[in-house]
Image (cartoon, coloured by chain):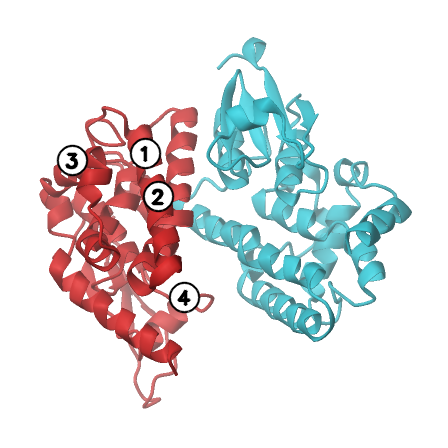
Amino acid sequence: MTNDHQHFIPFPSKTETELRVIKMGEEVILLDFWSSPFGMRVRIALAEKGIDYEEREENLNNKSSLLLKMNPIHKQIPVLIHKGRPICESMIIVQYIDEVWQNKVSLMPSDPYDKAIARFWADYIDKKIYSIGKLVWVSEGEVQEAAKKELVECFKLLEKELGDKHFFGGQNLNIVDVALIPFYTWFYALETCGNFSIVEECPHLVGWAKRCMDKQTVSNSLPDQYKIYTHLLELRNQHLAHLKG
Amino acid sequence: MGEENNNVRLHGNWASIYSKRVEYALKIKGIPYEYVEEDLMNKSHALVQYNPVHKKVPVFVHNGMPVAESLVILEYIDEAWPTHTPRLLPEDPYERAVVRFWANYLTHQVPESAKKVFFCKGEEQDEAINDLHEKLALVEHEMVDFIPKDTSKIKVDTLGILDIQLITLFVAHKAQEEVLGKKILDPEKHPLIYSWVIALQNLPVIKETIPPHDILVAALKQWS
């Protein structure tokens, strides 16, 4: 498809004279933030499919007018903009990418039942890992202990689902791998803040994570664990300072 | 999967909107099913076996294979019975992504808000109603491309996942408003959503599943 027409999407900016022109061609833009596990999911999916895209880093304390226009409901990243149109919510974006770019690897199984199982586990990861994991690195005392216990239970359940497969998707990554692997960047922070060893509790999961990281499409999409640790530590200190008033 | 080998069972609960969504999808598509009413205080062994992770309804069992989580079930039904119209999700990937976004919003954010309306009292309840109305205003404004323009044209074969999400949320709104003494669905604040809900309510497939008004009111009063 080579049609390449211009589509003006005017939107208010600080100066009010700024007009951005977004070419309604094949252009793919990702509004992202370096430490977001949700942004990482999209980066991996785009890399798996070999899609060229423009990455735009958002300042979450000063969101761009483009982000606010493209995701007026949640005002959150990631947002994928394809042919000038926004797609929001990381797992929705990942499925969109899989459905539009059918050329290479598939991130979803073809059988409807297998698809349902993959979607179930991606939903489980969405419901549990971020919120429980965050409690481990942001809180203290009893709250932290309870969250640690729950997180390990979640990881063990995921280990059971993985079984002896190479990846959740078998020989290739599927949406469950993509949904979960970004949280590997939290492991150092979780272990350090929570004072426990994930590899001791869940060796199979760590084995899976290392196999994912052996893939360039994953390792190039994820920031370094230590960088994430210092970032999360900063957020934790801000949170605790805020609590103590 | 051949028609001859289609054993379909739904474990649900009459008060669960998520359970209702799966029921409506099956009725709308004309897929025969066996329904098992679960007592949520005393869950069946089958339910726990089929959904060991969450132990919740709805659980959909197709030829002995269980599927849980209403959105996952709805997409599964759409894909496993591809010739049974109407299709719940659009074919076009972009439209499908937008519909999935709103399906998520109507599965998580709006029901959470609606729940607070029922479980809070006094000032907290007023705040919860305001929050719900704000969310509905957002839906009315931003989901406008998916709200039917001519509600007289709404028929069983034009229905999709968003119709199902919406009607399960508001099918009992008159009874709820009577019990609360407050407006949940305001035709002045949300005219498009209001007329959409009324049109859906009047479809025979929906109407025949709604308990009589006084029974609904009595049941809701028992809860509050």
Find residue B210 and report its horizontal and vertical position in percent: 80, 41
Considering the numbered disc 4 on the image, is that residue within a helix, a strand or a loop? loop
Q: Is residue A145 left or right of residue B193?
A: left
Q: CA distance from mark 2 to mark 3?
A: 26 Å
Tell me the subunit letter for badge 2: A
Find residue A220 and report its horizontal and vertical position in percent: 11, 51
Q: Which residue is mark 1?
A: A108
Query: If the image is split into quadrants, where does the C terminus of chain B sit?
Result: bottom right
Image colour for chain B is cyan
Q: Is residue A35 left or right of residue B12?
A: left
Tell me the subunit letter for badge 4: A
Q: Which residue is mark 3?
A: A207
Could you say which disc has been placed on residue A71 in the image? 4
Residues at badges 2 and 1 in contact (C-beta under 8 Å)? yes
Q: CA distance from mark 3 to mark 4?
A: 37 Å
Image colour for chain A is red
Q: Does residue B93 show up?
A: yes
